[in-house]
Image (cartoon, rainbow, N blue to C red):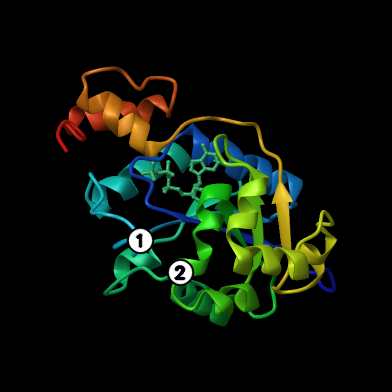
Amino acid sequence: MSGSAPTPLGIFGGTFDPIHYGHLRPALELREQLALGEVRFIPAAIPPHRGEPGASPQQRLAMLHLALDGIEGMSIDERELRREGPSYMVDTLRSLRDEVGARPLVLLLGFDAFLGLAAWHEWHSIIALAHLAIATRPGWERAQLQQQPELAQLWHERGSDDVTPLQQTPAGHMVMVEVTPLAISATAIRTQLRQGRTARFLLPDGVLDYIERNRLYLSD
Ligand code: ATP
């Protein structure tokens, strides 16, 4: 349609080691609540802020395909897996910005990830390249923001409950979004599997079957 503003593009980065319903359901709700045209899942190759993932990049990608293929409005972007070196989100956003022009970009973060933002490479540039949409996550409270003065200040300057600027401008605004609380984490899933317990119903059946077939996460 000529003349209508392009819908915002949601960017959901993570290790996805493995992908689970605590990623999938919040991503879907953020897409709905923020009227995102699409959510792109971007698996990190070498996550800068954590240890080696338990599954290889190819296995993590295969699990994302099992979870997302055929789901409307969700896609997978392999650019961090193809890039050499650490997977800095700022580099990812720069390359996306080159592709999308002025289309709004919305970086989706769980509240825990947002609390770590001030340690990210060139984090001040991130908010110039994208909006931030922060999803609530069980175990992390809004009051914890006060322990991070730089982020509290950023929220004070850029945060609001109004989601319309995310439709109208390319970058620079922040919103906090209540999503269905799902106390699911990849760490807990890996621990359960290592201990011989089942992770069924915490993640899609196809992903769990893949994990079992490939004997993933059986040791540290
Ligand atoms: P790990 O336990 O290995 O740290 P994780 O379950 O937190 O993994 P990541 O791949 O590190 O998953 O997270 C990717 C993104 O998804 C982050 O922004 C994180 O905050 C968000 N996220 C993960 N699980 C949830 C959840 N249950 N609710 C809301 N957001 C979540």
Does residue 127 lie above or below 212 as drawn? below
Q: Determine the secondary structure under disc 1.
A: loop
Q: Which residue is mark 2?
A: 120
Name the residue: 31% across, 45% down.
62
Report x, y in % for residue 40.
Answer: 53, 56
Left/right of residue 194 with respect to residue 192 in the rendered view: left
Does residue 144 lie above or below 160 as drawn? above
Depth check, front residue: 151 or 114: 151
Quadrant where the N terminus sits is bottom right
Amino acid type at image mark 1? His
Amino acid type at image mark 2? Trp
Report x, y in % for residue 21.
Answer: 49, 33
Does residue 208 lie above or below 44 as drawn? above
Name the residue: 36% across, 31% down.
188
Left/right of residue 208 with respect to residue 37 in the rendered view: left
Quadrant where the C terminus sits is top left
Does residue 197 lie above or below 184 as drawn? above
Q: Which residue is mark 1?
A: 49
Residue 147, quarter of picture: bottom right
Depth check, front residue: 99 or 106: 106
